[in-house]
Amino acid sequence: MTSIAGERIWSCCAYENNLRAELRWEAPAHPKPRDGAGARDDSLFPHLYGVLNLDAVVAVFDFNQSESGFTLPPDLPC
């Protein structure tokens, strides 16, 4: 799961079996953007329909921002 709050982007890892809200694996909203750099047709992404219960979260990672945008943390295990 990822959130954008101003200039800060973070991602959290959660145990799927511990989630209380419904989790659906779905295709992206825009699988084929105009520039052609989108997800593959068979890519599925987790969408949580409800409140994220914090006891399911096992890790939170901040994304690093550079002049070219945001990069994944090097220690992202999930």
Image: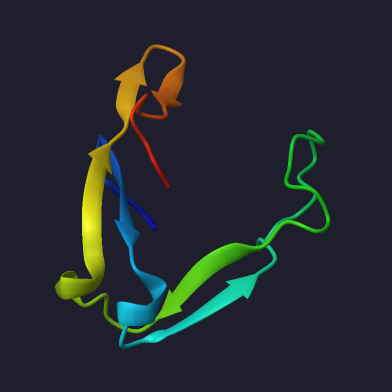
Is 43 situated above or below 27?
Answer: above
Is residue 27 something that shows in the picture?
Answer: yes
Residue 71 in which image quadrant: top left
Residue 23 image point, x, y percent: 47, 80
Quadrant in the picture for residue 38: top right
| Position above or below: 69 against 39 | above
Q: Is residue 43 above or below residue 46?
A: above
Task: Return the residue nearer the eye: 51 or 56.
Answer: 56
Q: Is residue 6 visible?
A: no
Residue placed most toward the observer, 20 or 68: 20
User: Residue at the location (43% across, 75% down)?
Assistant: 48
Residue most extreme to the left: 55
Q: Is residue 66 above or below residue 14?
A: above
The picture quadrant where one finds residue 70 is top left
Residue farthest toward the top in the current orientation of the protein: 67
Residue drawn at the location 55% of the way across and 79% of the way down: 24
Left or right of 56, for residue 44? right
- For the N terminus, the quadrant is bottom left
Which residue is found at the position 25% from the left and 35% from the top? 7
